[in-house]
Structure formats: C-alpha cells, structure tokens
Image (tube, grey):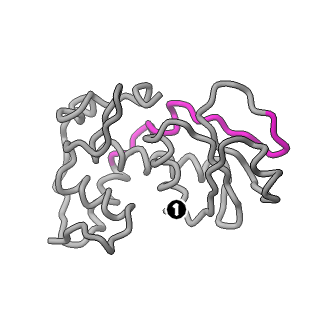
C-alpha cells in the first residue's frame, strides 16, 4: 500500500487519501470543512472547467482567490493540467511585476478591472454534472488501490464533515 510521505507531491497525496479514507476531514476552517473526497472531486471538476474555458500549458494564470479551500483546489487543478499559475493579491500586481497572464481566476463577486480576461468562479466550477466516473478513474490509477463501485448517494459523502455543497465553499 502506498503511504503519503514527505517526498510525495501534494496532489498525489490528496488522491491517495481520497481513495484510502474518503470521508476523513481534509481541511477545516472556522465556518466550513471538507473531506478528502470533496477536495479530490473539486480538483477534478475544476480541471474540467479549465479545459472548457480553453486554457492550455502555454498560458499563465493569475489566481486572486481569498477562500483557501477554493484556492487549493484551483491551484491543484492547474498543476494537474500543466498550467503555470501565480497567486496575486490584486490585478495591479500583474502590471507591477511585468507578468503577462492570460486570465485572472477569482472568487470575488466584485467586478475586477483588469487588462486581461477575468473569470469568476461560481459553484459550477466544483460540482461537475457527474464527476463520479472521473473520480473512479482517477482514484483507480493510484498504486495499490482498487476502487470497487461507490453506490452511495452523493449527498452522503460528507459524513465526517459538513455535507458537501459547492455553495458551502463560499
């Protein structure tokens, strides 16, 4: 059995934990918490959204996301897609640093003035229509893990944390 250790990539560790203990708490904030399965599902869904908006490995993506859970899932999805990213506090940081980002991903509902495209992440970014098949495929690729069907209703995933709802991320 593979064990997450100090030399393992963070992304791989998330998916190993999601396979081994999907309902265990992965992240907790004062007002919300998510399990490893929720984080893995969110990463997969966000990666799908990145493809849908046409981002490629040649893009530089600026991330202006305040919510640490969303930030983690987006940066993990970008890493998995091979897309370089930079976290910024404000769009001015791009101009000041001379970086030429293709897009800014944000969770802010306040309009952002920027010379590049701005994509506001909504609930749909983390709740794909049916990511269960993708999750099963992803988790089954991990060494020494076999995923045997998961017939649980999706609303029962969060038994060790608050039930997952993409709206709960905000």
Measured as percent of width and height from the top left, residue 52 is found at: 61, 48
Give the residues in magenta: 113-132
- In the rendered image, the residue lying farthest to the right is 115
On screen, residue 160 versus residue 87, left or right, reads left
Measured as percent of width and height from the top left, residue 11 is found at: 39, 61
Q: Which residue is drawn at 56% across and 31% down?
A: 122
Confirm whether the magenta stretch covers residue 128. Answer: yes
Relative to 159, residue 86 above or below: below
Relative to 84, residue 27 above or below: above
Measured as percent of width and height from the top left, residue 16 is found at: 26, 61
Q: Which residue is drawn at 66% across and 61% down?
A: 56
The picture quadrant where one finds residue 112 is: top right
Magenta stretch secondary structure, dominant: loop
User: Which residue lies under the disc numbered 1?
Assistant: 79
Q: Residue at x 62, y 30 (%)?
A: 108
On screen, residue 116 versus residue 80, left or right, reads right
Confirm whether the magenta stretch covers residue 140. Answer: no
Quadrant where the image shows the N terminus: bottom left
- Foreground of the two, 150 or 49: 49
Count residues near mark 1 (Cα–Cα under 10 Å), then give few for <14, some for 14-19, many for 20+.
some
Q: Residue at x 70, y 45 (%)?
A: 104
Circle 1 — which element? helix
- Foreground of the two, 140 or 103: 103
Q: What is the number of callouts on the image?
A: 1
- Foreground of the two, 87 or 162: 87
Measured as percent of width and height from the top left, residue 14 is found at: 32, 56
């Amino acid at each position: 059995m593979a064990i997450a250790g100090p030399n393992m990539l963070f992304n791989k560790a998330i998916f190993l934990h999601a396979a081994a203990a999907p309902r265990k708490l992965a992240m907790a904030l004062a007002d919300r918490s998510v399990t490893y399965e929720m984080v893995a599902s969110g990463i997969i869904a966000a990666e799908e959204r990145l493809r849908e908006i046409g981002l490629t490995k040649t893009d530089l993506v600026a991330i202006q996301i305040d919510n640490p859970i969303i930030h983690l899932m987006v940066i993990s999805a970008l890493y998995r897609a091979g897309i370089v990213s930079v976290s910024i506090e404000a769009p001015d940081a791009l101009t000041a640093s001379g970086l030429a980002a293709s897009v800014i991903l944000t969770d802010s509902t306040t309009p952002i003035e920027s010379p590049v495209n701005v994509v506001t992440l909504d609930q749909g970014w983390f709740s794909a229509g049916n990511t269960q098949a993708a999750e099963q495929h992803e988790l089954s690729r991990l060494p020494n893990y076999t995923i045997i069907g998961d017939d649980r209703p999706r609303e029962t995933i969060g038994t060790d944390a608050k039930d997952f709802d993409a709206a709960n991320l905000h």
